[in-house]
Amino acid sequence: MKDSKYITIEEAVRKGSGEVNLRGWVYRERKSNKFIFIVLRDETDIIQCVIAKNKTPKVFGAAEKLTIESSLKISGKIKEDDRAPTGYEVAVNEIEILQVAEPFPITEHQSPELLYDNRHLWLRSRQLNAILKVRHTIVGAIHQFFRDRGYFEFDAPIFQPSMSEGGSTLFEVKFFDDIVYLSQSWQLYAEAGIFSLGKIYNMGPTFRAEKSKTSRHLAEFWMAEMEAAWMELDEVTEVAKDEIRFIIGEVLNDRRKELEILERDVNLLERYLKADYPTIKYAEALEILNSKYDMDVPWGKDLRTIEEAKIADHFKVPVVVTHYPTEIMGFYKPPSKENPKEALCFDMLAPEEYCEIIGGSERSLLVDDMKMRLKAEGEDPETYNWYFDLRKYGSVPHSGYGLGVERVISWICGLDNIKDAIPFPRTMLRKSP
Ligand code: 4AD
Ligand code: MG
């Protein structure tokens, strides 16, 4: 088999008949006296391979040693077979075993914790393989969305001297003789970048010491952010809606097979692709919750996930909620002129109980107000002097938002837990492997 040309399982199935050379790993195996059935997997798919004792006794003898995840190369004849798990079967006539694997620690019906402990091995599962391919497509779509629209990619430091999203979720890092924090957001630096580049975006690692054990929070995640000079709230919310529809369109174009493996209801994604997404004010959201769902949310309280879920399910498509109470919002979210109690900010809430996937706002131009709010949060406004400079030298209205990449992956794939949207999850309770 030394000089053979190897093709992937997907290519072999496309070929459909004749001789094929494949290489991969044993996904499943079943042995009887006369036949050995191996389901072979590679990066593209799985395929059943059959070894008949009477036809190829030497190959049969070698294959008897094979265990789950053993690595091998095979040559054989492919043909359609309805009984095989993916509709094709290879009759093997040659085999080369690279390694007989030790007993694989992951067997059927394992607890989630064991799967997370063995994440380095579980990445090989069909499920993770499918999710990682959808992730690849979503990440590519985000870059394409912004580049096609004239945004420049702009990078911010990961080591930052201060917070942007509240001090309680900062990770402290020793930085020579000093302390700095891991980035909670690209935003404050992006606000400097727009004065040079106009419209910018980025996707990067983001860190939050979230002391919650929910299925929506990671301690390390990827955020895709944008920031644009001259843009106001009504425009930036439309960019966010277009971005989500673009991402869904790309996944539907390229990842049908993976969505099927994940048993995702594609009809829902088709609906999200074509739908208009409503924009409502926080006050209207309360109105809906209190009148239609018999809830009792007072003005001024942030929406909890249960309330976000009700709002998104009420409309059955992603919903943009704007004008949250200024008092409970970050220092940079500006009070509206008409009613300073409301901030010019928004969240996008995804249906099916996935809730907040995007958060954004116009950016405050009121330096004294921001200083006051920082002080109220226990921050030293001095640390932000460079940021306030941006309001001194040709200040312009500007806006931006951040999209939680794993939140969007979870929603589009229909995952139960955000931990499955990233190869090696980090949470309060998980820092290895
Ligand atoms: O709403 P957030 O905190 O907004 C910001 O950080 C802004 N500075 C972004 C901006 O305007 N440039 O975070 C943005 C999004 C959330 O909507 C959510 O989807 C995601 O980031 N996110 C998380 N995803 C996973 N785990 C966490 N702990 C997350 N925290 C936020
Ligand atoms: Mg938010």
Image (cartoon, helix red, strand yellow):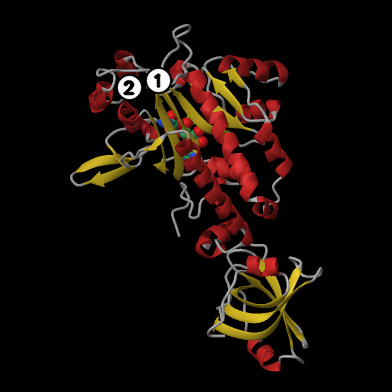
In this rendering, the answer to whether 74 lies above or below 312 is below
Q: Check disc 2 and report the residue beneath it.
A: 374
Q: How dense is the environment of label 2, judged by Cα within 10 Å: few (below 14), some, or many (20 and up)?
A: many
Three-letter code for the amino acid on which mark 2 is drawn: Leu
In this rendering, the answer to whether 406 lies above or below 403 is below
Horizontal relation, residue 132 to residue 383: left or right: right
Residue at the far right in the pictured view: 82
Q: Quadrant of residue 332?
A: top left
Residue 289 position, x and y percent, is 66, 20
Residue at 75% over, 91% down: 55
Three-letter code for the amino acid on which mark 1 is drawn: Trp
Image quarter hosting the C terminus: bottom left
The residue tagged with tag 2: helix, strand or loop?
helix
Residue at 35% over, 41% down: 171
111 and 146: which is toward the camera: 146
Label 1 – label 2 distance at C-alpha: 25 Å
Residue 315 position, x and y percent, is 69, 26
**Residue 237: in sight, yes or no?**
yes
In this rendering, the answer to whether 318 lies above or below 62 is above
Q: Check disc 1 and report the residue beneath it.
A: 230
Residue 229 position, x and y percent, is 38, 23
Horizontal relation, residue 97 to residue 197: left or right: right
Mark closer to the observer (1, 2): 1
Mark sitting earlier along the chain (1/2)? 1
Q: Are marks 1 and 2 in contact (CB under 8 Å)?
A: no
**Residue 212: in sight, yes or no?**
no
Residue at the far top in the pictured view: 338
Image quarter hosting the N terminus: bottom right
Residue at 51% over, 51% down: 422
Residue at 66% over, 30% down: 317
The residue tagged with tag 1: helix, strand or loop?
loop
